[in-house]
Image: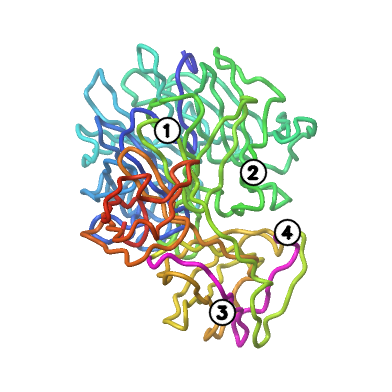
């Protein structure tokens, strides 16, 4: 029965039966073990044994039409190796290079010992509105295409697959239908090849929502709204459908994820659509729209944590779209929140997530040059940002504390343009690095992008916008994240610079004089030699920095 036990998935990965530790930097350029940019957009993740498989759209050609469904594997959700393409075009049919293949999801049919891929199958103008099915005997295939069709004769565009944990491992198709006015949930046949019956529908015309932060503001979603990006999480025996509003007159509202509860029998509970907090004014609607996706496994270690996974879509350069993964947690009020963290780690043994601590430097406190000027907007921290950066204007921030290694720096900015901007950033007068700045949906809507830079131990000077002819986005602030290390079975955070650190291979840091290196182990702050041992040379396993 739909939603009878354990959890999973909607723009989401539940954290269960995991091992080791993973560190995630949303919005960075992620590369595989060969150094190539990961191309797995709009994808889904499947766990087979101790290995994770990520299937997604290869957009290296920067176009929307079909080139390949890629397949990557990982032991830890961060180190990804690309394999053969899982699905490739078939000339003259519905998955040729002139067609669209989007949002691939793979589940395993135990009875048939077969992997089944479902995907959005469409014409280049989105008029076909179908789903496609392919099968293989191994996770990466290659998959054999079985065909495309409209489920029960209805349109299907944004879609996802949910596999229950009941004895029959019943699977369901979630799909936006009727010009995206409705979300439908239909049960698949025992082979997972076709749809047999519709079990639920969520209508935008009847939906209402509550503000989870207050639970006292309820409103009907405007009739001009449509739905996209569906996924299911199953938690404590109940299903929750997460999705996005595709079109909405208020751009801020389009950065909201909705949560809809479903009765175990599959009938939707009306007026139970919720706003999920954590993303407003943090990631723009473009960071969330188009390409959130459900997960295809039931792996729940505890009932309090999952991972939200989406794409920061770049329509005119699709291969450069970035991946946005955040913790999705439930609090004591039994309501979900997305924790929008610039840099975060997850303990894959117990599902506990930790956001890296960081130091904030407000842009308006820096030294302005050229045309750069202060801008007032309540959307900025402190209500002030620096605008007109670039084209002769720049801002320099001094006394930025570093530890003598690569560190992640997050630039918080607003870009009201319809397209992306970019800026330059340099450290201590060194070579400038270009940083892309996606549009944020408004002049007071703030988004962050990460960049990895080497900061010397002690004070540093960072200049943003110098030497570029184009205008950058308005800069609100920067946050310099601290390093996260794994020491034995614990985690420590660098809080002050270390004297003469020495790198051994790629993942080991030798601290010659531990007394000079102050660390924080969870909530315990002591000198490093007390945290580890009392020897003069200490080995620390690095979780993330430039030496990752």
| Closer to viewer: mark 3 or mark 1 | 1
Q: Earlier in the sequence, mark 2 or mark 3?
A: 2
- Magenta residues (range): 379-405
| Closer to viewer: mark 4 or mark 2 | 4
Crowd band around label 2 with a 10 angstrom C-alpha radius: few (<14), some (14–19), many (20+): many
Q: Which residue is mark 4?
A: 379
Q: For mark 1, give the secondary structure.
A: loop
Q: Which residue is mark 1?
A: 351
Residue 497 counted in the magenta span:
no
Would you place residue 206 above or below residue 73 in this image? Answer: above
| Separation of marks 1 and 2 at Cα, in angstroms | 25 Å
Residue 397 counted in the magenta span:
yes
Q: Which residue is mark 2?
A: 256
| Separation of marks 4 and 3 at Cα, in angstroms | 21 Å
| Separation of marks 1 and 4 at Cα, in angstroms | 33 Å
| Image marks 1 and 2: residues in contact by CB distance under 8 Å | no
Crowd band around label 1 with a 10 angstrom C-alpha radius: few (<14), some (14–19), many (20+): many
Q: For mark 3, give the secondary structure.
A: loop
Of the pair 194 and 261, the residue shown nearer to us: 261
| Closer to viewer: mark 2 or mark 3 | 3
Say left or right for 427 vs 387. left
Judge whether residue 128 can be spotted in this image. no
Q: For mark 2, give the secondary structure.
A: loop
Q: Earlier in the sequence, mark 4 or mark 3?
A: 4
The disc label shown at residue 465, or none: 3
């Amino acid at each position: 029965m739909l939603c009878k036990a354990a959890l999973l998935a909607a723009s989401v990965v539940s954290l269960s039966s995991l091992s080791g530790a993973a560190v995630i930097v949303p919005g960075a350029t992620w590369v595989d073990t060969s150094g190539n940019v990961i191309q797995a957009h709009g994808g889904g993740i499947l766990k087979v044994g101790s290995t994770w498989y990520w299937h997604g759209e290869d957009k290296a050609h920067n176009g929307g039409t079909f080139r390949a469904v890629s397949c990557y594997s990982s032991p830890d959700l961060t180190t990804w190796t690309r394999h053969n393409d899982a699905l490739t075009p078939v000339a003259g049919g519905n998955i040729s290079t002139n067609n669209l293949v989007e949002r691939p999801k793979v589940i395993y049919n135990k009875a048939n010992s077969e992997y089944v891929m479902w995907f959005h199958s469409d014409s280049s103008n989105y008029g076909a509105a179908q789903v496609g099915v392919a099968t293989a005997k191994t996770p990466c295939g290659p998959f054999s295409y079985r065909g495309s069709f409209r489920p029960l004769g209805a349109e299907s565009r944004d879609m996802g697959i949910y596999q229950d944990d009941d004895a029959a491992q019943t699977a369901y198709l979630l799909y936006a239908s009727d010009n995206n006015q409705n979300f439908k949930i239909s049960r698949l046949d025992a082979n997972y090849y076709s749809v047999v019956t519709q079990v639920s529908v969520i209508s935008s015309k009847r939906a209402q929502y509550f503000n989870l932060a207050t639970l006292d503001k309820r409103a009907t979603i405007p009739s001009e709204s449509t739905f996209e990006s569906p996924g299911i999480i199953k938690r404590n025996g109940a299903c929750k459908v997460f999705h996005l509003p595709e079109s909405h007159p208020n751009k801020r509202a389009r950065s909201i994820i909705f949560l809809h509860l479903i009765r175990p029998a599959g009938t939707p509970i009306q007026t139970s659509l919720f706003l999920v907090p954590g993303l407003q004014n943090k990631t723009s609607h473009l960071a969330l729209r188009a390409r959130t996706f459900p997960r295809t496994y039931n792996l729940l270690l505890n009932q309090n944590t999952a991972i939200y996974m989406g794409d920061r879509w770049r329509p005119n350069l699709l291969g450069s779209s970035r991946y946005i993964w955040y913790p999705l947690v439930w609090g004591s009020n039994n309501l979900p929140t997305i924790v929008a963290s610039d840099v975060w780690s997850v303990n894959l043994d117990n599902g506990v997530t930790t956001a890296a601590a960081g130091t904030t430097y407000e842009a308006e406190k820096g030294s302005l040059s050229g045309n750069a000027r202060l801008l007032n907007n309540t959307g900025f921290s402190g209500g002030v940002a620096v605008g007109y950066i670039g084209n002769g204007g720049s801002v320099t921030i001094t006394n930025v504390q570093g530890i003598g290694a690569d560190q992640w720096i997050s630039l918080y900015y607003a870009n009201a343009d319809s397209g992306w901007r970019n800026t330059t950033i340099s450290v201590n007068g060194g070579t400038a690095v270009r940083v892309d700045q996606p549009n944020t949906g408004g002049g007071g809507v703030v988004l962050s992008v990460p960049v990895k830079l080497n900061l010397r131990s002690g004070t540093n000077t960072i200049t943003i916008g110098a030497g570029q002819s184009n205008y950058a986005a308005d800069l609100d602030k920067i946050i310099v994240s601290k390093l996260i290390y794994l020491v034995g079975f614990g985690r420590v955070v660098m809080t002050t610079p270390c004297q003469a650190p020495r790198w051994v291979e790629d993942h080991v840091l030798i601290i010659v004089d531990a007394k000079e290196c102050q660390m924080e182990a969870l909530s315990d702050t002591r000198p490093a030699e007390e945290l580890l041992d009392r020897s003069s040379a200490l080995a620390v396993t690095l979780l993330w920095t430039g030496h990752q």
